[in-house]
Amino acid sequence: MYEQVKDENFIIISVAEESRGNETAREWIEEAKPTYVNLIDREHHVADLYNMVNVPQSVWIDENGRIVRPTETAGSHDGWRSMNREDLSVPEDSAAIIAKAQETYVNAVRDWAVNGAESRHVFSEAAARAHMQLPTGNVALANANFRLGLYLHTSGNEAEGNSFLQAAVELRPESWNIYRQAMNLRQIGPMGFAADEDFFARVDALGSDRYYPPPDIEGFPNELGFDPPA
Amino acid sequence: MATILTEAGATDVAGAEAADESLWLPIEDVTRATGWTMKPEGLCRGEVCVPVPKDRDDQFVREGAVNVAEFWRHIDSPVLHDAAGDTWMLGNSAGERAKALETLEAPDFTLPDLDGKPHSLSDYRGKRVFLTTWSSW
């Protein structure tokens, strides 16, 4: 998408929420050979500033540094929950919904990249504020626990670091940024990502609740895309 | 000696004294460790000054030192430390973060790229920025 609109007054800043830093980020970035700006955020500072709970989440910022769409899920869809947990395959109907979600979101970003303030996806100031999730006291405390836990963990005090990381997880269970990063700091998962029994138990505990609130974009698929666990 | 973590980074302060929930820093180290500066009107950062409560000023200030942990709690911001009292986290309050977001001014940040070169969001003023996140985990 970026290649197509590169001449416009538009840039992608892609932030890796990676507490292990280049150790885990480099390979992915070099493989993708991106032409946009790639930054490494060991301390999840951007997630803290913009009150993000997962990746990918996005914010649209105009030429004057103003937020025209606050933090939202960038095209992810709960349809992935239909995934076969052995071979990681996704049934065709869910795969189609997931693809439609991504396509709808990317098209909206492209429309804004080309049309700027004229894009129908740009919110008014009132709408931008209305779409914001603001942090609570527990969020602020979770972020402080995460930061201290990470510092201790990476400066030779893993056990005590892990206890603060765990406190962060408990203070803000909805943040998969914190939960999965903490898991990844203890050990990089066998599939390269943090998905173990505990993770899938969390997913199942959501029941028929969505994890990803659909972004407010016309045409974004509204189906659940998975069968809730019995 | 203590290490103080804030959103600006980690700062070692040789003359710090930690005791229970108090963290006393030499007045001359307060600014570099916390971003706040002791002045006659209170602790100040930029245009903002927060007076020290008169009825319990001995909990905040003593000769040559400021209890920055007590001040942090006074401004409703999270304070945490390790069991040994060697490392202290002075966090940001939910109110501060929420207020910043509600202005709709995109909060600025500076982060390194793969080669360690720093980039700030504000470097890209004048362009539309699609700010997005990912991870390997």
Image (tube, coloured by chain):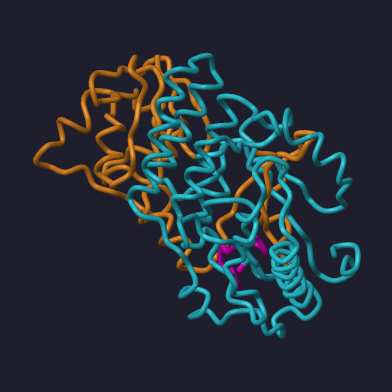
Chain colours: A cyan, B orange
Which quarter of the figure has residue A142?
top left
Which sits in the foreground, A189 or B9?
A189
Which sits in the foreground, A206 or A3?
A206
Q: Residue furthest left?
A: B55
Query: Where are the magenta residues, as a range?
Result: A66-76
- Expressed as whole percent of the image width and height from the top left, the position of residue A140 reads 39, 46
Screen quadrant of the C terminus of chain B? top right
Q: Looking at the picture, does residue B47 appear above or below residue B71?
A: below
Which quarter of the figure has residue A93?
bottom right
Q: Residue at x 66, y 62 (%)?
A: A74
- Expressed as whole percent of the image width and height from the top left, the position of residue B67 reads 27, 29
A52 sits left or right of A35 in the view: left
Which sits in the foreground, B124 or A196?
A196
A182 sits left or right of A109 in the view: left
Q: Residue furthest front?
A: A230
Q: Residue at x 42, y 61 (%)?
A: A134
Whether B80 is among the magenta residues is no
Screen quadrant of the N terminus of chain B? top left
Q: Looking at the picture, does residue A44 appear above or below residue A105?
A: above
